[in-house]
Amino acid sequence: MNLMYRNFKVDRARAQSSHDQGTQPRQSQVNNLDQHTEKNRLLILGDVFLPEAQQIKMSLESPFVFNLEGPITKTNKGCLGKIILKADESFIRETFGLYPLAVSLANNHIMDYGEEGLEDTLRVLKQNGVSFFGAGSLTQNCHNPLVLDVHGTKTAFMGYVSETASGVFATNAAAGVMPPDLQRIKKDIAIAKSQGAVFIVVMLHWGAEEVFLPSEDDIKTAHQIVDAGADMIAGSHAHCIQAYEVYQGKHIFYGLGNFITPDLNARIISVSAEEKKFIKKQMFWNRYSLAADIGMMDQSVRIRRFYYHVKKGFAVEAPTHITRYALKAGHLTSYGKKFRISYVCGKIRRMAVDFMYHPRVPTARNFKNVFSFLSRGNR
Ligand SMILES: [Fe+2]
């Protein structure tokens, strides 16, 4: 493996004990990261799903954070009626050569194997000194915010899942994730600031899958979150790179894309316990991702692009003119039409690919889906 890695010297013990507190309202976790670590940078990557080990054929010398798309658990008691993902064991170390500084658990798959799956995941992360945020019980405020001392800059991470991404939300009775409610985010930012955070990263799991542009509503929400005090928004879930923009001097990544997500061979268990397979072939647009490479001294942002070779099982840097991904929204009213075209194209493109790789007689549900995509496009 062509991977250079180093020990980030994170105070893992403090991270774990902070996670174990389970205080109410949430007490942020505070770590210390050696100030002399490589170039004083922090890397925020897109979605990572590791049912088996992959390889990173590049230098990842900075501490990094990513969205962990699914639990790490051996349980087979999956949620009924949805596509369920999991890794039987952690392949993070085998893939990256080291563990990330933290992972976001705010996504639509972390609860696929219920609270048992979440607890197993938290145990594995704690055992390996990985901090986490974005899922848990309400008394834990879903582990938001997480505050870490990154190269001397107290940095807050918090994660939320939009309702359109079908998150399993925490209730008084059960753990889960949190929706991106603006008032909730404002409170979490205030908690983070009270913990001394001066750089605030909000990770949002949202956006229409397979669509290259964010909706007008997502743009408005992102701007409100920046106005509320966020220094960066890192979105994910769309399985492709969505546009990015700089608003009020802050970077908004609407969708970083899949950093590593192999072809899917997932389970769907019906209410009657009948089990089906969900197969998804990752196309080239599902294999590129952006990453925010942040200089913690001045919070400058370098945008990088990566490519994940699905068949070969490794990820590499894929430099390009990044401005090609810059959002050209113009006036939001006229942007709406652009988004709707992108939406219809993205959805139909995915259906066409699925039929090409798995030819079958279209069902009534397929026609219903096409109709719903087209009607959304005409709105
Ligand atoms: Fe997702």
Image (tube, helix red, strand yellow):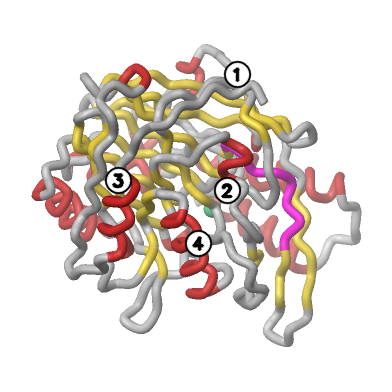
Foreground: disc 4 or disc 2: 4
Mark 3, secondary structure of its residue: strand
Instruction: Name the residue at 73% across, 35% down.
Output: 313
Instruction: Name the residue at 29% across, 21% down.
Output: 36
Circle number at residue 318 = 1
Mark 4, secondary structure of its residue: helix
Label 2 near ligand 1 (CB < 8 Å): yes
First in sequence: mark 4 vs mark 3: 4
Q: Nearer the viewer, residue 112 or 278?
A: 112
First in sequence: mark 1 vs mark 3: 3
Circle number at residue 157 = 3
Apparent side of residue 155 relative to residue 71 in the rendered image (left or right): left
Foreground: disc 4 or disc 1: 4
- CA gap, disc 1 to disc 3? 26 Å
Magenta stretch mostly in which secondary structure?
Answer: strand
Foreground: disc 2 or disc 1: 1
Residue kind at label 2, given as amino acid type: Glu
Percent x, y for residue 374?
62, 51
Q: Nearer the viewer, residue 368 or 26?
A: 26
Q: Magenta stretch: give its range.
A: 259-266
Image quarter where the N terminus lies is top right
Mark 1, secondary structure of its residue: loop
Mark 4 Cα shell of 10 Å, populated few (<14), some (14-19), many (≥20): many
Percent x, y for residue 219?
35, 41
First in sequence: mark 4 vs mark 2: 4
Q: Quadrant of residue 244?
A: top left
First in sequence: mark 3 vs mark 2: 3
Circle number at residue 121 = 4
Percent x, y for residue 300?
28, 19
> Badge 2 is on which residue?
209
